[in-house]
Image (cartoon, rainbow, N blue to C red):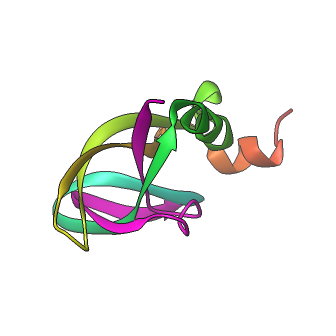
Amino acid sequence: MSMVKLFVHGILRGEGCPAKLYNYERFMRGFSTIKKKEGCITTGELLVLTKEELDQFDIVEGVVHDYYHRFMIRCVTDEDGVVHDAWVYQQVVDKDIKDSMLGVGD
């Protein structure tokens, strides 16, 4: 079974290995997201998942509706300092997440 890695930085945390994402800043825009910012460190966790589990995270994060998109980054686990290629979610900038999640305008 093929496994994938996912760096999580918001409400998805709780089951993974502590890790850091360098040169990204975590901030709230209705929900937790990240943006590229030199010198910043985002703390989070590294999860190891099956492809099927990652597909389920895509549903939860609203990837199909363009609420978040998923892309590859490099993060570092705290315990051993190992660099990992992992997926991460980032909120899509041009969507008004709050209104769409609450059904405003439907």
Q: At 81% across and 49% down in the image, what residue appears? A: 102
Q: Quadrant of the C terminus?
A: top right
Q: Is residue 97 above or below residue 21?
A: above
From the viewer's perspective, tell me whether residue 48 is left or right of residue 42: right
Q: Magenta span covers which residues?
A: 1-29
Quarter residue 78 falls in: bottom left
Locate residue 96, reporting x and y percent: 62, 43
Give me the residue at 68% from left, 51% from top.
Answer: 98
13 in magenta? yes
- Using the image as rendered, state which of residue 2 and residue 95 is in the foreground: 2
In the image as oriented, which residue stretches furthest toward the front?
1
Residue 58 in the figure: left or right of residue 28: right
Residue 94's place in the image compared with 24, above or below, is above
x and y percent of residue 81 in the render? 16, 66
The percent coordinates of residue 10 (x first, y second) are 52, 63
Which quadrant of the view contains residue 60? top right
Foreground: 70 or 65? 70
Q: Is residue 35 left or right of residue 65?
A: left
Observer-nearest of 1 and 63 = 1
The reply to whether the magenta stretch includes residue 81 is no
Q: Main secondary structure of the magenta part?
A: strand
In the image, 84 versus 34, the foreground residue is 84
Name which residue lies at 17% across and 59% down: 82
**Most distant residue in the top direction:** 64
Q: Residue at x 57, y 59 (%)?
A: 12
